[in-house]
Image (spheres, grey):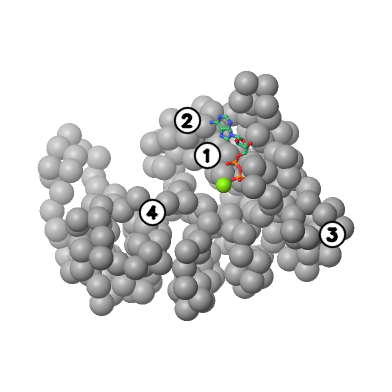
Amino acid sequence: MTNNDFMLSVEDLTVSFDGFKAVDALNLYVDRNELRVVIGPNGAGKTTLLDLICGKTKATAGSIRFKGKELTKLAEHDIVRSGVGRKFQTPSIYENLSVFENLEISFPRGRGVFGSLAFRRTPDVVERVQGVAEEIFLADHLDMEAGLLSHGQKQWLEIGMLLIQSPELLMLDEPVAGMSVKERELTAELLRRICLNRSVIVIEHDMDFVQRIAHKVTVLHQGKMLAEGSMKKVQADPRVIEVYLGH
Ligand code: ADP
Ligand code: MG
């Protein structure tokens, strides 16, 4: 199998900030329909890795191929357009718009001359918004102002705003931070469901949550891969226990 068979192939990826390598010659391969969790101590380079994949930060060296296409030279919006969605640690929703409107404005529009001006609330848009709202447990909150949602619901809404664009690779940075136990359970259910037709990369510290969702776990440490494999395998790895799990 060639590396182009992976949804995402990261090879020799390096980014240097004034000589400090936050990500250092990293290789990472993510399959189609895989849910990969990336763990590691603070400062390991987890968020920087997602920044590199989504084009927010430019690589110093190495390659990132998504469905065989090189991303390192693309602008952020072209990476989004090619099917990569990324959620940041803090939700960025429009607090004074309704849940419905937040989803609606995230719906990918025609890219005609008139852009958003030509956008109309057509039945297919309404149907898609309702479908996504159901997926993210907000079907009964469509008319609510987003600012009034709980912290967990805001996180779900932001996931919905990405889902409505049908990304083939979805990346989430600490999605359950600040969520209640019940919200965590529902989020695990949501993530297991959404990776059925796309690849998902999740950064997370909550090991009970990781256990529930991960197909494979990658442990980062000082910008490098320390260990990779099943949850069971990495949990038993003495190096992982020493730098991360033991604390
Ligand atoms: P993690 O998400 O694993 O906690 P980060 O990827 O946020 O770690 O950070 C990895 C390291 O890179 C940290 O030491 C951080 O200070 C550094 N870093 C991240 N972004 C920048 C930047 N834009 N400029 C300089 N240093 C950075
Ligand atoms: Mg981080």
Secondary element at tag 2: loop
The residue at which mark 3 appears reads as 237
> Does residue 63 show up?
yes
Residue that lies at the very extreme toward the right in this rendered image:
238
Residue 186 screen position, x and y as percent: 47, 75
> Contact (CB < 8 A) between labels 2 and 4?
no
Disc 1 Cβ-to-ligand 1 distance below 8 Å: yes
Q: CA distance from mark 3 to mark 1?
A: 28 Å
The residue at which mark 1 appears reads as 51
Dot 1 amino acid type: Asp
Which comes sooner in the sequence, label 4 or label 1? 1
In front: label 2 or label 3: 3
Dot 4 amino acid type: Pro
Secondary element at tag 4: loop
Secondary element at tag 1: helix
Residue that lies at the very extreme toward the top in this rendered image:
18
